[in-house]
Image (tube, rainbow, N blue to C red):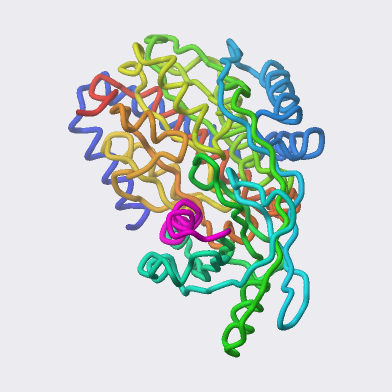
Amino acid sequence: MSVISKKCSLLLVLCLLPVPVQAETESAHDTAVQLREAGMGSGLAWEIVEGLTTEVGPRLAGTEADHRAVEWAKRKLEALSFDKVWLERIEFPVWTRRHEAARIEAPYPQELHVTALGYSGSTDGEITAEVIGFADLDAFRNAPLEQVEGRFVFINQYTERTRTGAGYGDSVKVRYDSGLLAKEKGALGVLIRSIGTDSHRFPHTGVSTMANDPLPAVALSAPDADQLARIMSRGDSIRISLDIRVGFREAGHSWNVIAQLNGRETPEKLVLIGAHLDSWDLGTGAVDDGAGVAITAAAAHLIGELPQRPGSSIRLVLFGNEEAGLWGAKQYVDAHAENLENHIYASESDFGAGPVWRFDTDNPVLMEAAMPVLEVLGIEKGEAARSGGPDIVPLQERGVRIFRLRQDGTDYFDYHHTADDTLDKIDPEQLKQNVAAWAVVTWLAAELDNSSQGTSD
């Protein structure tokens, strides 16, 4: 659609609105343009993600590093333009890795690069056994017990590279389901091809399904998975040694870090934006999800620097322990159950730092107000959002309306959950484009007439 057509579309929407709402929308548009330009000129997001990844680094939920991250984030938000900053304690079990090693014993002895999956069990010393391979989870699911019992299982399912992350959605079930299925079939442990799209020798961790007395479960780097598959293709029997030591505490804790800009007209109503503060322990959590922390905090700060607050409140939530099961998100919903009807919108930035390319919402007023401002940033008009992000799922399930600023994730799963998730993977200019887009949409969502918004049926 051309710029002229976009303007005509906005004018048509304005003509259909009551006069006071027309004036409100026109004023909000002008402010949105101002926010867009401020976002494109701001280095605050880079400053935030650089500080988090440098001064804290890896921050596995429930660990000392995670607690330092919470303190760091609270101080950072208190130094910005929020009206209130507070912590809400969350509780969950804590899983930690202590040692991980694997090697091929026969027929061609060599080391394998692996990492334990979250909630994996330990081997209790090194164990050696024959390994049997499967092309994907379905093939393993259909295998008879006698084929698997007493062996290691190797699942070599690939993850397709896509801009939207759909390939990850198709393959991540291998990580969640393989351990439980392997235990049911009497296996000694499971090795999976990393759920990632890179060709580097960095294995990808990630949470598996929590279980009593779990099997040891590891991810192989892509080149190591290829190597193992090549050896299997020669028809030789393969023996692997695995030595995995992990820790588990049933009672751990962290906090959701929350900051708010109070609305000038209906402060009880709020637009919730957020990211998750925790990360896996292999990299420094720059892409996942230091970028999201930086983007949403910087966008909210720009709105807070305006001469007046938006009509409704804006709440920033840096969720705790997303990585091991959305613990902070679920406990946020429990803690605020009586006020969910006042959550106008919710959305999360948790897909790296690639540029936003599409805006999704089911509200035509918000869409038509936002698009003339967003199109300058190279953002397309989308459709009704199907997801607001992982931590938004519990809110969405309770009827809270969502929007989505969709990022280009073409290379996101090259780094996701690996030791390669570091600050150098973030482009500062793309980070600014994200901040600009988030500031525009968050402002408009909180400023425009919200009489028809709130929880959905």
| Foreground pick, 367 / 84 | 84
Query: Is 191 positioned to the left or the right of 165 in the image?
Result: right
> Residue 14 falls in which quadrant of the image?
top left
| Quadrant in which the N terminus appears | bottom left
Tell me where residue 358 appears, x and y as whole percent.
42, 51
| Quadrant in which the C terminus appears | top left
**Residue at the spot 39% in from the left edge and 35% down from the top edge:** 393
Q: Which residues are magenta?
A: 169-188
Tell me where residue 109 appears, x and y as whole percent.
77, 78
Query: Is 441 positioned to the left or the right of 75 in the image?
Result: left
**Residue at the spot 74% in from the left edge and 68% down from the top edge:** 103
Q: Main secondary structure of the magenta part?
A: helix
Callout count: 0
**Residue at the spot 42% in from the left edge and 24% down from the top edge:** 271
Residue pushed farthest right? 55
> Residue 364 falls in which quadrant of the image?
top left
Query: Is 243 positioned to the left or the right of 379 in the image?
Result: right
| Foreground pick, 452 / 273 | 273
Where 262 falls versus 116 (above or below)? above
